[in-house]
Image: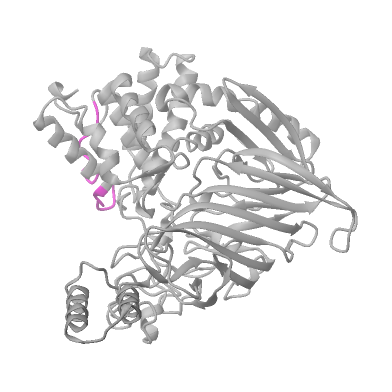
């Protein structure tokens, strides 16, 4: 892929210009043709990954050459058979960042192991700006492959969780994708196996100029389903009794819709779902209306089309669709529209218990605003669904599984509406940033109970110190994985994703105090809501709270110890030494507090 600033293209351009000058009788037609050839030479295929070279954490997802702006999602969904019918299509409004002859999306049309619940989808047609486009499915390759994404070497398209794949004696190349495992498989059981062909490569009939807006319309049908993760978990489109719900972190969205499946891709959404009449339909944002349809061949008892719109950008793993039989309660408080739902098939007694806990969502929002600032959306909600998947902070609608919820998890998932949803990690290895804050919300809730709601009281800080000390005394393998270096195998398991980052935030709060700590969080919300956050952008405002260069250096060492350091097993001296005042470990110098 070239650009007009490259030495090669500059040389070609100069030679063509010289040829025009020296060749007699060259008219306007020849000049136009030559200019077209130069323009085409500057065009190329968009990258098929957004990962850095050598990356082993989900290197297969993300696509370059364009920016995701908006998606119109039209689902024709038979909730009784769990099928997308003909007429289902995704219209992606994209903005090119280079001249494109080819682009790609992430779309998993099937499960290579044919597991129950896996997707079985078929693309019917694709258009680019209304014109038919060619398309094919391709395996991902490892980021930075000098031979390009279509490298004929099969070793360039293998699964793995380490670089090189399976060790240098097996495959000297980096992995092209993270493996998908079932629960019985070992950690590296699939290292070296071929990656599934999850890259939907689209070739328009004419190149797309840089800086232009264009529409890609993908029509498809079939059974949406689940993506298998490296730790044995599954995520995606979960069929439930009477419908379905999406629960998709980290990669499951591609098992039911084509998209740029990277957390940094955050388009806005309009979602239309046509399904059986009488079903509850929920998506991100606010409901815009519904239309009723008469009975027909596909919906014998009639159907409805429900429209939802999110004017706030939505990260790839937070796109919500919920269809089923639900009881609902809604109300507006402090400018936020709340919706509380429960699957009607949950036993009545459990629904009463759930209702009391769901009613605390508004209280949770009010309390957490003290730390993170105004609630970032105009709608909030929670749905209790039937068992099968994990609890998940889908944007503007928390989804609870197992037919029940607990209040601590309610606070955790609601904190995600600020951190993860409004402000999203720029890369997968920043997962600690948002999961740590969500787990810290549970710490704050426990301190609030002890202090009877007084977050400025001595009892509140005492509880935070006690909770920190309990975490800090952890031994065994608690400290052996650096939060900034997660692997596909333990992405959502272990202390490095949740408890260790939460303890770090606890120590930061005790060191900086309420005013300076919340100044940072509220400032990050003002600057990055609707967008993403890098490590440097996260770290910089905390450092700015330090009074001197020496104190900033101390805080940098603190971050390195808590986020970037893998310690030997056992705890004790094998853990961060910089902590906070009046807690276990070593506090900051007094002049830095």
Colouring style: one colour
Please identify the dominant SS of the magenta region: loop
The percent position of residue 537, horizontal first and vertical second, equals: 28, 41
Nearer to the camera, 32 or 149 = 32
Q: Is residue 446 above or below residue 189?
A: above
- Residue, x 49% and y 66% (percent of image)? 105
Which quadrant is home to the N terminus? bottom left
The span picked out in magenta is 564-580
- Residue, x 65% and y 71% (percent of image)? 120
Q: Is residue 28 left or right of residue 60?
A: left
Q: Is residue 392 left or right of residue 209?
A: right
- Residue 118 occupies quadrant: bottom right
Residue 579 covered by magenta stretch: yes
Q: Is residue 93 left or right of residue 85?
A: left
Query: From this viewpoint, which residue is outermost toward the left?
Result: 550
Query: From this viewpoint, which residue is outermost toward the front?
Result: 25
Q: Is residue 95 above or below residue 126?
A: above
- Residue, x 54% and y 74% (percent of image)? 133
The percent position of residue 127, horizontal first and vertical second, equals: 57, 69
Nearer to the camera, 107 or 69 = 69
Which quadrant is home to the C terminus? top left
Residue 143 covered by magenta stretch: no
The percent position of residue 275, horizontal first and vertical second, equals: 77, 53
Instruction: Confirm whether residue 241 shows in the render.
Output: no
Q: Is residue 464 above or below residue 39?
A: above
Instruction: Confirm whether residue 125 shows in the render.
Output: yes
């Amino acid at each position: 892929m070239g650009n007009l600033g490259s030495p090669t293209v500059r040389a070609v351009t100069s030679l063509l210009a010289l040829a025009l000058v020296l060749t007699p009788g060259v008219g306007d037609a020849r000049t136009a043709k030559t200019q077209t050839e130069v323009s085409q030479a500057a065009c190329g295929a968009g990258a098929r990954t957004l990962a850095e070279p050598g990356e082993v954490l989900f290197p297969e997802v993300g696509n370059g050459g364009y920016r995701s702006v908006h998606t119109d999602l039209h689902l024709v969904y038979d909730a009784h058979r769990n099928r997308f019918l003909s007429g289902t299509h995704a219209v992606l409004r994209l903005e090119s960042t280079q001249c494109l002859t080819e682009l790609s999306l992430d779309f998993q049309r099937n499960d290579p192991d044919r597991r129950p619940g896996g997707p079985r989808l078929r693309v019917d047609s694709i258009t680019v700006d209304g014109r038919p486009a060619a398309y094919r499915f391709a395996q991902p390759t490892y980021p930075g492959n000098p031979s390009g994404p279509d490298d004929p070497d099969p070793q360039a398209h293998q699964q793995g969780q380490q670089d090189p794949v399976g060790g240098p004696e097996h495959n000297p190349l980096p992995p092209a994708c993270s493996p998908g495992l079932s629960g019985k498989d070992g950690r590296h059981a699939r290292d070296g196996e071929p990656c599934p062909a999850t890259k939907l490569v689209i070739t328009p009939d004419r190149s797309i100029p840089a800086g232009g807006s264009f529409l890609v319309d993908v029509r498809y049908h079939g059974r949406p389903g689940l993506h298998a993760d490296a730790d044995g978990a599954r995520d995606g489109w979960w069929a439930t009794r009477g419908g379905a719900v999406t629960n998709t972190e980290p990669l499951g969205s591609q098992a039911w819709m084509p998209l740029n499946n990277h957390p940094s891709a955050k388009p806005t959404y309009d979602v239309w779902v046509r399904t059986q009449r009488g079903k509850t339909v929920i998506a991100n944002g606010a409901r815009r209306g519904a239309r009723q349809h008469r009975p027909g061949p596909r919906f014998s008892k009639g159907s409805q089309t429900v429209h939802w719109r999110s004017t706030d950008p939505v990260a790839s793993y937070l796109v919500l669709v919920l269809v089923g039989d639900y009881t609902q309660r809604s109300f507006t408080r402090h400018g936020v529209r709340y919706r509380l739902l429960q699957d009607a098939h949950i036993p009545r007694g459990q629904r009463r218990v759930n209702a009391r806990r769901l009613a605390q969502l508004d209280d949770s929002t009010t309390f957490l605003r003290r730390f993170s600032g105004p609630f970032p959306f105009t709608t909030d909600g929670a749905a209790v669904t039937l068992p099968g998947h994990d609890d998940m902070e889908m944007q503007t609608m928390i989804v609870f599984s197992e037919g029940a919820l607990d209040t601590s998890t309610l606070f955790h998932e609601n904190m995600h509406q600020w951190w993860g949803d409004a402000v999203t990690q720029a890369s997968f290895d920043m997962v600690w940033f948002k999961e740590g804050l969500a787990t810290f919300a549970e710490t704050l809730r426990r301190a609030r109970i002890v202090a009877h709601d007084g977050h400025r009281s001595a009892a509140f800080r005492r509880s935070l110190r006690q909770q920190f000390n309990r975490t800090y005394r952890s031994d065994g393998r608690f400290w052996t994985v650096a939060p900034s270096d997660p692997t596909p195998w333990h992405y959502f398991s272990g202390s490095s994703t949740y408890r260790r980052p939460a303890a770090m935030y606890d120590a930061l709060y005790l060191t900086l105090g309420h005013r300076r700590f919340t100044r940072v969080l509220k400032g990050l919300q003002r600057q990055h809501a609707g967008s993403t956050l890098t490590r440097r952008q996260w770290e910089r405002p905390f450092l700015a709270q330090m009074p001197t260069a020496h104190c900033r250096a101390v805080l940098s060492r603190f971050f390195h110890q808590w986020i970037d350091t893998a310690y030997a097993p056992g705890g004790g001296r094998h853990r961060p030494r910089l902590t906070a005042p009046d807690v276990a470990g070593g506090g900051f110098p007094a002049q830095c507090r």
